Image (cartoon, rainbow, N blue to C red):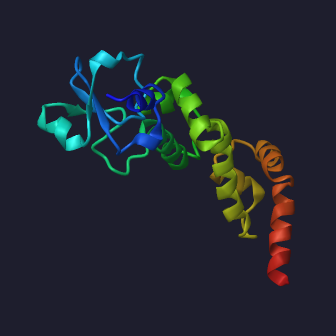
């Protein structure tokens, strides 16, 4: 193992992914250089030029960094995407971090940190943003009442919906609808 390879492993450097792989003697797992592992010691690591070399010697792909998946974005990205999908599927329901974490089989603190880091919003912010996006689609239909749209977007009351909508969009739902309808006439 070169000093450069050791530093890449120690620093979980993504720039070295695909250039070499390392295996852990004790666990018999092979990883990408970017894999975040607890503190390692150089004598516990074996370097391989290719993944196939490690597999041929009986090492198994790490389930955390998935070196066997060429275009895999990482466990944290996968978790954030799964959480986003669940929020979008359940946007009409009351937001429950406990339920979401349980359904994804992760600790809720880890889920919160990961989602915020990967997506740039908290889960609750994203939930509200997605609800507002759906509400905007419905507001384009003038025959629907604001109360109905609030209910369809998952809000219990029209006043709470209006409050959140104003906070996110800088205007009330009625103002948004008026501007939208006005733009159609132009």
Task: Locate residue 39, reporting x and y percent.
Answer: 42, 16
Instruction: Examine the rendering and report whether any part of residue 116 can be seen.
Output: yes
Pick the residue in front: 30 or 153.
30
Q: Vertical placement of 40 versus 72: above or below?
A: above
Q: Which quadrant of the figure has residue 185? A: bottom right
Residue 117 position, x and y percent, is 60, 36
Screen quadrant of the N terminus: top left
Residue visible at 39% across and 42% down in the picture: 17
Looking at the image, how many numbered discs can be counted on the residues? 0
Q: Nearer the viewer, residue 25 or 155?
A: 25
- Quarter assignment of residue 180: bottom right
Residue farthest front in this picture? 2
Which of the image's four quarters has the C terminus?
bottom right
| Residue at left offset 30%, top offset 31% | 22
Residue 94 visible in the picture: no
- State the residue at coordinates (86%, 55%): 171
Q: Quadrant of residue 141?
A: bottom right
State whether residue 42 is above or below residue 77. above
Pick the residue in front: 70 or 185.
Answer: 70
**Nearer the observer, 177 or 75:** 75
Left or right: 126, with 54 as reference point = right
Q: Residue at x 50, y 33 (%)?
A: 100
Q: Position of residue 99 (x, y in %)?
A: 49, 30
Q: Is residue 80 above or below residue 113?
A: below
Q: Is 163 displayed left or right of 61 in the figure?
A: right
90 w.r.t. 172: above or below: above
Image location (x, y in percent) of residue 155: 68, 44
């Amino acid at each position: 193992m070169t000093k450069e390879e050791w530093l890449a492993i120690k620093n979980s450097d993504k720039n070295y992914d695909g250039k070499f792989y390392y295996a852990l003697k004790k666990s018999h797992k092979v990883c990408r250089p970017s894999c975040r592992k607890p503190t390692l010691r150089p004598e516990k690591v074996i370097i391989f030029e290719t993944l196939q070399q490690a597999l041929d010697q009986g090492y198994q792909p790490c389930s955390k960094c998935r070196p066997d998946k060429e275009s895999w974005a990482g466990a944290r990205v996968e978790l954030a995407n799964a959480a986003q999908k669940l929020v979008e599927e359940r946007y009409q329901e009351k937001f429950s971090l406990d339920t979401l974490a349980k359904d994804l089989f992760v600790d809720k603190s880890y889920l919160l940190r990961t989602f915020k880091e990967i997506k740039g919003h908290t889960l609750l912010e994203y939930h509200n943003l997605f609800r507002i996006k759906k509400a905007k689609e419905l507001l384009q239909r003038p025959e629907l009442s604001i109360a109905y749209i609030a209910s369809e977007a998952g809000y219990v009351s029209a006043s709470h919906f209006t409050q959140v909508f104003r906070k996110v969009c800088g205007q009330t739902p009625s103002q948004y609808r008026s501007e939208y309808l006005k733009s159609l006439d132009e």
